[in-house]
Each structure stands twice: as structure tokens, then as C-alpha cells.
Amino acid sequence: MFKEIKSFFAKGNNRTIKAKKNIFYSFFIKGLSILVNLVNVNLLLTYLKPDLYGAWLTLSSVIAALSFFDIGLTNGLRNRFTEFKAKKLHQKAKIYISTTYMVLILIFSSLWVLFYLINDFLDWSKVLNVDPLLNGDLKILALIFVSFFCLQMILKTINTIIVADQSPAKAASLDLLGQSLSLLVVIFLINNTETSLIYLGFGVSFFPIVIYVLSTIYFFNNDYKIYLPSFNYVKYDYVKDIFSIGVKFFIIQLSIIVYFQVNNLLISHIGTSSDVAVYNIAYKYMSISLMGFSIIISPFWSAFTDAFASNEFTWMKDTLKKLKFIYIFFLIVIIALVVLSNFAYELWIGNKIVIPFSLTMIIGFYMIFSCWNFLHSQILNGIGKIQIQLILSASTILHIPLGYFLGLKYGVNGVVASSLLFIAVGSIVSAFQLNLIIEGKSKGIWNR
């Protein structure tokens, strides 16, 4: 059996072998990451109780929305780095890395200063629809979140480089280490302090930054020494090229924020903070399927970039067929998760909070279309054919009024149903476009 396993990982070209190994290691790492996240939800519910936990989630979502200020630069870098490394254009890759770091520093340092100036004028209790007495703590928590988040957006560029080098398992291990240290912080706080949003915010935000600092130092002194960022290699003339790709990814990322992050705000205003907690717990549970599927699909972004640059359409076509069989397996997983949800919730969070089966089922349908969309959009991202995604992503801004309208009528289920509608349309169109490209039949906008 050991020989057969070894043979499986040795079959195929270098691109396929590298993808197989990363999938194998990623399953182990991401599996642990999912476990850490599930345990963390239970601990946070214990430490904060449902109302504060809902406020915590909503504020986290608002701050996470700031990620779109990287205007897709890291995704633009990802495609360019893979391309240049494949063509052995190392000096050009170093220019792109150095320039991306500098632009991100300028963007997020400016963003931090702006937020610092306006934070005192914001009434977070009204934004989050919670007790006005919490406003003081929420101001401090928001500043903590934004400070560490801006640092993280700059430092996580090393993850982009690692993933672009078709080594997502390494990047995932860094995330896991940061999450694990944050989990230990929560355990410490539960056993040694009274409930404090400020202690919690600082504790869970600090250690991931430490991991990214250390990993940046390590990788640029070892694996990527020839790409070590330098002021001398910052070329603002190249920003236009990175931006031309990145701005498209920026709009696509913005639509993802609309799908999930805006939902928290809609739900908090239509219902209560407890409803936000209900939605997030159900979403985290069902997203196990999408996380597992993404472990397999993610390595193929850069693999397809490499294959497309080499005009290896036969490999692309054969690989896509195999990935579709994997999708069928995860379709069964999603159905199983829905059927077993009540038992799973009881085992996971006990009676701390009640999750309606109808909500789980709607999110299940959302995951079915999300996985199908993820399969095709990741490949389209890798080969740079994202014009259609760009148009569809821009149209998802309509989710805000539609989600609010359906939310008023059907509650949390209505908000999620609006997200489901948009992701279903996107998944069907992306599959159609990719099939046209691989068959050599794409023309006009379908080939952009």
C-alpha cells in the first residue's frame, strides 16, 4: 500500500505532482485549522455570551471589509509572480514584489491614520445595534482591530508569494499557527479574566502578526532570498500593470465581502446581535465543505496560470474533468452536513444557541453553488480571464437592497436567500465561460 501511495504522488508532470503533494499536506493542515475554528467558536460563546459574540462578529466583519483597500494588488502579484518565476525572470519578479510591498504600506498606513482620526466620532453601538454602554469599549476594540489588520494586510504578502509558488500548504501552516496561538489566548482569558472585549481583541490579533513577521524574515532569507524586497527595486511605473490586473480582482473581492460581511450588518439591523451569532455558527458549520473543497482547488490557480502560459490545453481539459468528479463528492458531503446538522450543533455548542434547520438548509444550497463557482472561478482567475466575473461581481451590490427587503419579510433566511440567488447565477456563468475557453470556442467578452 505504501508503494501505491508513493507511486500516486510520483505520477504526472511536475505541476501535477506539486499540486497533489500540496493537497495532501493542506488537508492535514486545513483539517486542524477547521478544528481550531470550531473549538474557538464554542470558547468565544462561553467567554462573551451570544449578544456580545454577535457584536464581536459584526465588528470583525466591518473591519475585515477594509481588506478591499489592497485593490486586488496581492492577487495581481500572485499571477505575475507565477508567470515570471516560470519564465525565470527573477529580477522582474523582485521588482513586482518590492513595488507591491511599498504600495501596500502607503495604502494601509494612510488608512490607519484616517481611521484613527474619525474613530472618536463614530458611535459603534448604533452601527452594531447594541447597548450604548458598550460604545467606549467598542471604540478601543475597533482601533485595535484596524491597527493589527493594517499590519496584517502588508505582512500577509509573504503568503501570496508562497501560494503563487504553488506551495499553499506552507501558507496554510502559517495561518494555522496564528489561529492556534489565538485559541490559547482565549483559553487563558476564560480562566483568568472577566469578560473583556479589549483583552480579547488585543490577544487574538497580536500573535498572528508575530507569525507573519517571523515568516517574512525567514522566507526572504531562505527560499525567496533572490526576491528580497528592496527600495532600489520599487518601480512605480509597474504599479499600472499590477493595478490593471489587481483592480479587477478588487471588484471581485468586494462582491465576496458583500456576500458575507454585509450580511452581518443587515442581520444585526433587521434582527439582533444574537441573530448574527446564529447565522455565523450555521455558516461556519456548513462552510466546512467549502473549506475542504478549496484545499483541493486552490493549488490549481497557479498551476493553471503556468499551464495556460505554456499552452498546455490538454492538461487543463483533463484536470478540469477530474476536479468535477471531486465536486460530486463534496456535493454529497454538503447534503450529509445538512442532514446531520441538529446532531452536530448539539455536539458542538450544546444548548447555548438554537440554529433553525431551515437556515442550515438554505446555507447548504449556498455552499453547493459556492463550490461550483469556486471550481471554475479559481481557474479563470489563474488564466486571467475575469471580465465576466468582474461584471457579475459589480452587479452583486444589488444584494444589499434585495437582502434587506427579503430580510424584513423572511428574517435571516431572507438575507441568505438573496446571497444564494447571486452566487447561483455567478456559478452557472463561470462554468459556461471556462468550458468555452478550454474548448477553444471563446470569443469577445467570453475570452477576456
Image: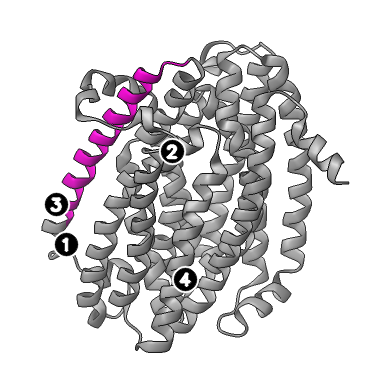
| Residue type at the position of mark 2 | Thr
| Residue type at the position of mark 1 | Asn
Mark toward the start of the polypeptide (2 vs 1): 1
Would you say 3 lies left or right of 40 here? right
**Marks 3 and 2: CB-CB under 8 Å?**
no
Would you say 103 lies left or right of 248 here? left
Q: Secondary structure at mark 3?
A: helix
Residue 277: image x %, image y %?
48, 72
Mark toward the start of the polypeptide (3 vs 4): 3
* Residue 87 image label: none
- Observer-side mark, 2 or 1, equals 2
**Which residue is labeled 3 in the image?**
113
Q: How many angstroms separate mark 2 from mark 1 (CA)?
A: 30 Å
Q: How many angstroms separate mark 3 from mark 4 (CA)?
A: 30 Å
**Which residue is labeled 2 in the image?**
160
Magenta region, residue range:
88-115
| Residue type at the position of mark 4 | Leu
In the rendered view, would you say 46 is above or below 254? below
Crowd tier of the residue under label 1, counting other residues whose Cα lies within 10 Å: few below 14, some 14–19, many 20 or above:
some
Q: How many angstroms separate mark 4 from mark 2 (CA)?
A: 24 Å
**Which residue is labeled 1 in the image?**
119
- Observer-side mark, 3 or 2, equals 2
**Marks 2 and 1: CB-CB under 8 Å?**
no
**Marks 1 and 3: CB-CB under 8 Å?**
no
Would you say 93 lies left or right of 324 here? left
Mark toward the start of the polypeptide (3 vs 2): 3
Mark toward the start of the polypeptide (1 vs 3): 3
